[in-house]
Amino acid sequence: MTDIDAVGSAPGRVNLIGEHTDYNGGFALPLALPHRATATLRRRDDRNVTVLSDGREAVPVEFDVETKPGDVEGWAAYIAGLFWALREAGHEVPGADIRISSDVPSGAGLSSSAALECSVLTGLDALAGLGLDPTTMALLAQRTENHYVGAPTGLMDQMASMHGREGHVVLFDAAAVTAEPIPCDLAAAGLSLLIVNTRVHHQHADGEYGERRRTCEDAARRLGVESLRDVQDHAVEQVLARLDDGSDAGAGDVMRRRVRHVLTENQRVEETVELLRSGRLREIGPLLTASHVSLRDDYEVTVQELDVAVDAALEAGALGARMTGGGFGGSIIALVDDGQATAVAEAVRDAFAGNGFTAPDTFVAVPSAGAGVVSSS
């Protein structure tokens, strides 16, 4: 692509703790990864948009700036939806030729879609001179996923991608829609955060994710509140007792377990933040493991590969381990002492081989910078 006008870049994210809390008005603690998506944009004189992604089909996807939901499907919908969301918000954007490159693993629970959206939005903001702030761009990206792509996701992924900072995790408060950097210098504490991509592809736009969100929304209505965040300060068992109306024991038990996960997960996020602020990074390990147990038993979003990976990491000496992302596949994280990442990764690979699973991918995550403009004319 010649005559480049703007280049936007945005990271994937891994969530340290706080899963399935964002769409319930709760807390999450993600960090931006060094893995990034890059969007190179060139302004067009007409109202057309072409998008081409390195590593995908060689033929560009084309659509009009006036696109609406249903016009574009597949990976390009995440980009077309941004033009729609910007227009719906009253912003004028020009036609553009857009080329995407990304080293964020797709389907690994590391928010490759949020990185894609935020890189393009950052580039479009520079191209059109919109002057949007990071939180506004995160909200536009979420609107794209919810209403154009059709994935009922929360806001955590986009906020992490936009607000990431080197050496920090991001305390995302979904009710207040704020992002606060929390110091997390793993290296200084003699620790590493190992990511294990199970290579089991997950898909947020399927029924399982939406079903859990609907269950939580139904529980909030039964409790007479707008979201589960509104009962966060109540004793968990008291909240669960209020959900027991005796009408459907089976469905009621599922609802209580879903709510118990959300409320206890928010508590674990708050405890993790306090430990990080006091420099007691090693002590967060048991909270990570407790989060995985809750996601496995109460929220039921793990799969065998995730559970095997967590168990193998813990048996090999990890201080804590949990699945990360929406679940039903994707990745786990393991907090390990420096120098132990290779041994823990090897233990997980051995466990996968013993169970006949495809060999996982592993790497060490470092809290990195959020989205930004690489260059613009």
Image (cartoon, grey):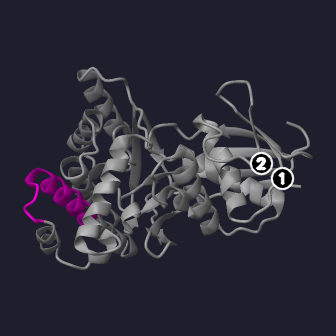
Answer yes or no: is residue 372 visible: no
| Residue at 89% over, 45% down | 46
State the SS at label 2: loop
Answer yes or no: is residue 208 visible: yes
- Magenta-tinted stretch: 244-264
Residue 94's disc is 1
Q: Counting residues from the N terminus, which is met first, the one under dot 2 or under dot 1?
A: 2
Tag 2: Cα neighbours inside 10 Å, few (<14), some, or many (≥20)?
A: many
State the SS at label 1: loop
Q: Position of 350 compared to 143: left or right?
A: left
Indicate whether 64 appears above or below 349: below
**Which tag is nearer the camera, tag 2 or tag 1?**
2
Indicate whether 133 appears above or below 147: below
Which residue is at the front of the view, 29 or 277?
29
Give the percent coordinates (x, y) of residue 272: 33, 67
State how far apart marks 2 and 1 are (Cα).
7 Å
Tag 1: amino acid: Pro
| Residue at 68% over, 65% down | 89
Give the percent coordinates (x, y) of residue 255: 20, 57
Q: Picture quarter containing residue 22?
A: bottom left
Which residue is at the front of the view, 73 or 282?
73
| Residue at 33% over, 43% down | 208
Residue 103's disc is none
Question: Mark 2 and 1 residues: CB-CB less than 8 Å, in contact?
Answer: yes
Q: Which residue is the site of mark 2?
A: 65
Q: Position of 43 compared to 88: left or right?
A: right
Q: Residue furthest front?
A: 247
Quarter placement of the C terminus: bottom right
Give the percent coordinates (x, y) of residue 248: 11, 55
Give the percent coordinates (x, y) of residue 256: 17, 60
Q: Residue furthest bottom?
A: 233
Q: Is residue 252 magenta?
A: yes
